[in-house]
Image: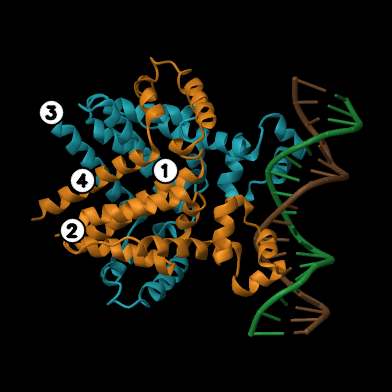
Chain colours: A orange, B cyan, C brown, D green
Amino acid sequence: MLGTVALLDEAGADALTFRALAARLGGGVGSIYWYVGSKDELVGRAADHVLGEVSAATTLPDDADPVDNVRALAMAVYEAIARRRWLGAYLMQDFGFQPNSMALYDRIGQQLQRLPLTTRQRFHAVSAVIGYVVGVSAELDHGPAAIEEMADDEREAFLERLRTTWRAVDPATHPFLAEVTEEFEQHRDEDLFAAGLDLLLAGLRQQASAAE
Amino acid sequence: MLGTVALLDEAGADALTFRALAARLGGGVGSIYWYVGSKDELVGRAADHVLGEVSAATTLPDDADPVDNVRALAMAVYEAIARRRWLGAYLMQDFGFQPNSMALYDRIGQQLQRLPLTTRQRFHAVSAVIGYVVGVSAELDHGPAAIEEMADDEREAFLERLRTTWRAVDPATHPFLAEVTEEFEQHRDEDLFAAGLDLLLAGLRQQASAAE
DNA sequence: ACCTGAACACCGTTCAAGT
DNA sequence: ACCTGAACACCGTTCAAGT
């Protein structure tokens, strides 16, 4: 289990094979199946383990604004997935069935229990936040590394590809792309994630205040 | 290309192998590489092709509210991914580099150009909407089929698994799960998606009206 | 220019056999 | 009870050879 996380962190999702893991643990390929039924289960457990650490490292003060607390939790999960690129894809699998993901779901929900919302509104809001966080973060797994973490030459190559793709389109047919190309080149992935999250949370705050 | 979409629709992502596709087209495995450089490119092109159809089938009236238009487009993409479970995973790959995904990105952006927002706000908002739609829809690809489309016995088995998992947790430590279990069992995936989207769009409307 | 299909270098998973 | 590793049934990709 620990060996799985270490191997994923060191070499990425592609490097996690039963043969590589068995070699690292000094055993045979088949022995892993004594502890785990499939590769999906193996990585799912590893992902849930990491999620537990992330959740444990984030404290939510009782006297803080509940939506601010939800935001703090969401940003912590985002950062974890951004750091460990293999994580997002597996959290999408069956979030809500592993112990730590259930606990995280509940923890977000508890914050919303402090707001004047219906049960259905709470259910929708928690699902939306989790969906946004996991879904958008997982998109990072594909695509290139975060723009802000690329080496200089790597970033330059990526932006060059972007420029030639985006700037090749006709501004007359793609007026918005023309407007935001420069903005895209300068953005940080984390700011983009946070801005979308804040729109979602603004909608939530509005819903809560309308009920008062 | 058309054969690819047909094969994916009929038998799902797992069934799309070069051998199966070559057999269907009545050719050798190697010949596919004359038209496409890799499997990722093959499925990416198929995904972009479907996205183009979806976008073309959605008309956005000039006299309609721009945010309502964005909502219509988002729901159309959601429905397409919900129907074709293989689609979401590949849209995550490199949305914004294929022609039809670029066109869709631009089309959403054009609606926002009708609102009093800064370029940065527009960039953030379009990215958030696309991120939410593609990310949350893609989560459907994993997990079970939509609850509302399951056969009766299949749905019963899924809900039974959920009940035993969620109801096994201590309500004292998981008070929110206890509150929403029933709500979860009754929900429709599409309503859940729409509710989160509406929170996001409410935040966006608020941002636009604050600028006036 | 376009196609063929055997061959290569991998996978996850199984299972008879060991301790 | 726990481990081994050869064997099985696949993959995507390559490439010398064909038309």
* Chain of the residue under the numbered disc 1 shown in the image: B
The residue labelled by disc 3 is B212
In this rendering, the answer to whether B36 lies above or below A94 is above
Identify the disc placed on residue A202.
4
Badge 3 amino acid: Glu
Residue B26 location, quadrant: top right
Name the quadrant of the C terminus of chain A.
Answer: bottom left
Q: Position of residue A28 (x, y in %)?
A: 72, 69
Q: Position of residue B160 (x, y in %)?
A: 42, 73
Identify the disc placed on residue A64.
2
- SS of the residue at dot 1? helix
Say if labels 4 and 3 share a chain: no
- CA gap, disc 2 to disc 1? 32 Å
Residue A101 location, quadrant: bottom left
- CA gap, disc 3 to disc 2? 31 Å
Q: Position of residue A7 (x, y in %)?
A: 59, 57
> Which one is in front in this view, the residue at disc 3 or the one at disc 2?
2
The residue labelled by disc 1 is B134
Badge 4 amino acid: Ala
- SS of the residue at dot 2? loop
Badge 2 amino acid: Ala
* Chain of the residue under the numbered disc 4 shown in the image: A
- CA gap, disc 4 to disc 2? 17 Å
> Is residue B106 left or right of B48 when viewed as pictured?
left
Badge 1 amino acid: Val
- CA gap, disc 4 to disc 1? 21 Å
Task: Please state which of residues A159 and B65 is positioned toward the viewer in this rendering.
Answer: A159
> Is residue B29 left or right of A6 when viewed as pictured?
right
